[in-house]
Image (cartoon, rainbow, N blue to C red):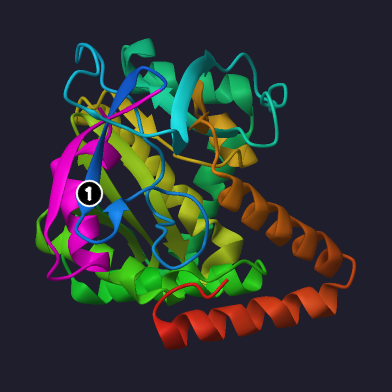
Amino acid sequence: MNFYSSDAYLEALAATWFPGRRCQVGLFAAEGKLFRLVDVEGHGPMLTDGPRPGSYHFLDYFEHLEGAGGPGGARSIRWLPRVALEVREIQGPSLEEAPHSASVAVAPYVDWSRFRDWAAFQAHVVSRRGNLARDSKRRQRNLEKALGRLRYEWDDRRPAVFDLAVAWKRSQYVRSNLRDELAILQNVQMFRELWRRGLLVISSLSAGERLVAAHLGVVWQRRFSYWVPAYDRGALSFSPGRLLLEYMLAESQARCHSQFEFLLGDEQYKYHYATHRRLVGNLGTQPLSESLRKGARAMVKRTLSLHPPSLEKARTLQNRWAARLGHAAL
């Protein structure tokens, strides 16, 4: 069971999006498999899909319960989005064959049982990208020359680190012409609630007196989730985000975690480190209303993509409305 199926996460999610409402974590059955979801009074089970109000971008994916018996007593649901469907080993340094369909995403991870020590993992990384370790050492030396000695913290409790991580990530969304997920008030509140409950691990990298990278993550049942990486764009030439990631990988192995999960997304850098990837997709029959809504959104996106200035304006307006309303408007 991953973190997104835990009472700790689901209760924090419900408390953030539906404050004051009664909620209960329970068993739900889809396609003969059991899942843990949170059911909110007057709303129903909180699922993951779509940017409409009431959907939850940072709920990464569900895993079914192993060895939980049959679905007796569980509520039946016809459709569950973002479910881990299968695991595949990564065979080489390049991206593997495309997933089964456009509706299937990937979530790479490191299986630490494959490596007896840090040196063995470093050899694995060299096999994926031969110059990566040398390049990281060079950038670290240059960063220390420019700004001062590096200081890494696995769990940095300073409030300013949380605030900077959120601000940097929001800037990255805007630069990348993506919807600003952290303009959605509930998303930031959810991370604060997880931090308040002692669940959020905020890692940081400083050079001299200057914070240059930060990360919001979580450890659950010996699995570390690499969740929200952020960095100071002013230090971009030194790759501070990568340097922090590599410190965190070493710490994760030293803490005897079973996995270092990169979560959803097949960005190339993840394949420099990952050993496996999960295929994540929908389970069951998607409701017609959801299919129509997704189709309409895809058509609008395709049309706007032919006119980049219009797409940029649409994104800007969407982010403004999201910030004003406290949720994604489209």
Q: Nearer the viewer, residue 307 or 115?
A: 307
Expressed as whole percent of the image width and height from the top left, the position of residue 189 reads 26, 70
Q: In which quarter of the image is residue 325?
A: bottom left
Residue 96's x, y, as percent? 68, 22
Most foreground residue, 113 or 14: 14
- In the rendered image, the vertical position of residue 245 relative to residue 306, given as above or below: above
Q: Is residue 55 above or below residue 24?
A: below
State which region is magenta.
Answer: 1-30
Res. 209 visible in picture? no
Residue at x-position 84% and y-position 72%: 308
Which residue shows up at 18% across the image and 30% down it?
221
Q: In this view, does 100 lie above or below 328?
A: above
Locate the C terminus by quadrant.
bottom right
Residue 253 point in image, percent of width and height: 28, 28
Circle 1 sits on which residue? 39
Q: Name which residue lies at 11% across and 60% down.
A: 22
Q: Which residue is drawn at 79% across and 59% down?
A: 299
Q: Is mark 1 on a helix, strand or loop?
A: strand
Residue 10 magenta-highlighted? yes
Give left or right: position of 93 versus 168.
Answer: right
**Is 278 left or right of 149, judged from the image as shown?**
right
Asked whether 50 falls inside the magenta stretch, the response is no
Q: In which quarter of the image is residue 200?
A: bottom left
Where's residue 254, x and y in %?
A: 23, 29
Give the residue furthest to the right.
Answer: 306
Residue 187 visible from this viewpoint:
yes
